[in-house]
Image (cartoon, rainbow, N blue to C red):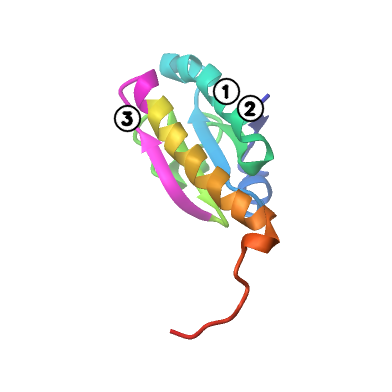
């Protein structure tokens, strides 16, 4: 299930999230949005708790749509610590999206494994 986020909950659920968040800007009338929904659910199940998936109805949250300068739907933003790390828009189909999601998944699953195993992390302070 995808958490539905609005302008009122966006800051708490996305910008202040302790884990990276994939934000799916969509609309009920958007055919491509419905087509990619199963891919996003699969992505979420593969990433588990390492990446949060939320949906934003672009029609009902016009201020967010303007703030993030949406040009087309769906638009996907990967937000980490309040900063946009990836922006996916204008993809040509499922395969384009699948490849982009795979790249994101690999980046973040590798990173979190490093954080979860303190014995592999080098915690010494060094100067340049």
Please tell me whether mark 3 or mark 1 is closer to you in this view: 1
Residue wearing tag 1? 42
Q: Are marks 2 and 1 in contact (CB under 8 Å)?
A: yes
Look at the image and give the residue range highlighted in magenta.
83-96
Q: What residue sits 34% from the left and 35% below the top?
A: 71
Q: What residue sits 50% from the left and 23% below the top?
A: 27
Please tell me whether mark 3 or mark 2 is closer to you in this view: 2
- Give the alpha-carbon distance from disc 3 to disc 2, as whole Å: 24 Å
Q: Are marks 3 and 1 in contact (CB under 8 Å)?
A: no
- Give the alpha-carbon distance from disc 2 to disc 1, as whole Å: 5 Å
- Give the alpha-carbon distance from disc 3 to disc 1, as whole Å: 20 Å
N-terminal-most mark, 3 or 2: 2
- Which secondary structure lies at badge 2? helix
- Which secondary structure lies at badge 3? loop
Mark 2 surroundings: few (<14), some (14-19) or many (≥20) residues within 10 A = few
Residue wearing tag 3? 90
Q: Nearer the viewer, residue 71 or 51?
A: 51
Mark 3 surroundings: few (<14), some (14-19) or many (≥20) residues within 10 A = some
Mark number, residue 29: none
Q: Quadrant of the N terminus?
A: top right
Residue wearing tag 2? 45
Query: Is-magenta flag for residue 120?
Result: no
Q: What residue sits 58% from the left and 81% below the top?
A: 125
Q: Nearer the viewer, residue 90 or 118?
A: 118
Give the quarter of the image for residue 16.
bottom right
Query: At which x and y percent is residue 52?
Result: 63, 39
Q: Image height check: is 10 above or below 89?
A: below
């Amino acid at each position: 299930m995808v958490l539905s986020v609005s302008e009122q909950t966006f800051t708490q659920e996305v910008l202040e999230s302790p884990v990276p968040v994939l934000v799916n800007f969509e609309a009920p009338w958007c055919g491509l949005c419905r087509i990619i929904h199963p891919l996003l659910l699969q992505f979420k199940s593969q990433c588990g708790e390492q990446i949060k998936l939320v949906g934003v109805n672009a029609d009902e949250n016009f201020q967010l749509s303007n703030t993030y300068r949406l040009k087309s739907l769906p638009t996907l933003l990967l937000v980490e610590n309040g900063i946009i790390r990836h922006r996916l828009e204008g993809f040509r189909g499922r395969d384009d999206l699948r490849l982009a999601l795979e790249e994101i998944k690999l980046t973040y699953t590798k990173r979190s494994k490093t954080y979860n195993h303190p014995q592999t992390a080098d915690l010494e302070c060094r100067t340049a």
